[in-house]
Image: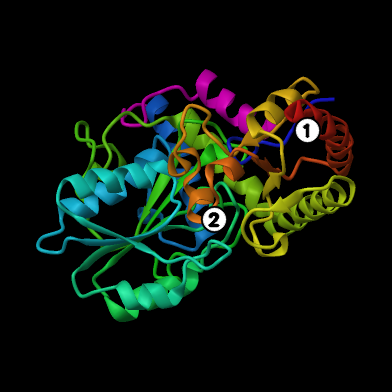
Amino acid sequence: MEIYFDNGATTQPTEQVVQKMTEVLTEAYGNPSSLHRKGQEAERYVVEARKTIAEALHVPVETIYFTSGATESSNTALLGVAARAGKKRHILAAKGEHPATGDTLKRLAEQGFEIEYLDLDPCGRVRLESLKEKIRPDTLLVTCMHVNNETGIIHPIDQMGIVIHEAAPDCVFHVDAVQSFGKLPIDPVGWHIDLMSTSAHKIHGPKGIGFLYIRKGLYLPPLLTGGGQERRFRSGTENVPGIAGFGQAVKEAYEDMAGHASHMQGLKALLYQSLSEQIEGVSVNGAPIEETAPHVLNLYIQDVRSEVLLHTLEDYGIYISSGSACASNKPEEKSPALSALGLDAKAIDSSIRVSFSRYNTREEVLEFVRVMTQVVPMLRRFKRR
């Protein structure tokens, strides 16, 4: 049995997504900018996908811009806002952001922008009081994940948007929704979100495609120039198969989003309860599991290096993520999110992420627990030697 519990990294495309992409690749392979019938056929897939996404988020279709993925979307958002900064140089960010945001902020700091980080509560969530205290008239941008990709904590994006809108109406609010889009409700208009980054491959769509939501009326200079595709904002021939697959994945994700979330939350609770009852020294990193995103569980496994555990489980056909980068001795480079929680390098080295999809089963969870009860004691004995 192969058990894939690394869905926070990527998901397997569904059969319907693959069929939709194959249809485009083999039949509607024209350039959507071409004026002939083949081009118009391809364009229809782009129009359909954009409409599907816009309807899911209850936003105008002209606010959805397709990109190569969330990294491009976040870079475009942050660098675009910075390019039109004027005299405003102050940026607020949550600690523990994904490198697509974190590394871009470092680049902006080198250009003279003042980057300040919001305080977190003991579970890793942004403190609203910190946002209220630190936002200023010259704050250009606030950027924050909705769901942290490592710990699954849910930042109070809905309340943050209200605070920002009231304290600094001209401040731009960017949200990295990669781990929440298609899994949790999102209301860009009601939550005062100006920019939002997403990626298809986290919701059983293809890799290499995402979108950037840009609030209607907000101008950003393009990051990529050329042929003027995507309404002259993002140049480059559209990835029509990817766009069509993304639209299909969104349609499937939103068909029963609450049911999917409940299913994954149940698997997460079963896994943690079973592991903690049968193995000593297992605890959750971050917020209690009922307060985090339904698909992400970050665990500390005492006296077991996560890299070793990951490869041991791989021999059993079980795939998870390690909470560390073995090439680094710096906690903040090993894991931005766990470092932000105050974990030291040793604790980070013993942390794993288990992430679910709607297609995982109770039987897979129980098999995972069974294998863990065998390998964890074995690895601990090796360590003591």
Write down the residue under mark 1.
380
In the rendered structure, the answer to whether residue 322 lies left or right of residue 282 reads left
Query: The residue tagged with tag 2: helix, strand or loop?
Result: loop
Badge 2 local density, few (<14 within 10 Å), some, or many (20+)? many
Q: Nearer the viewer, mark 1 or mark 2?
A: 1
Query: Which quadrant is the N terminus positioned in?
Result: top right
Q: Position of residue 179 (x, y in %)?
A: 55, 49
Label ID, residue 300? none
Magenta part of the chain: 14-36
Q: CA distance from mark 1 to mark 2?
A: 32 Å
Where in the figure is residue 187, as x and y percent of width and height?
50, 66
Q: Is residue 255 above or below residue 11?
A: below
Quarter the C terminus occupies: top right
Question: Visible in this render: residue 77?
Answer: yes
Q: Residue at x 43, y 71 (%)?
A: 160
The amino acid beneath tag 2 is Val
Residue closer to the observer: 193 or 328: 328
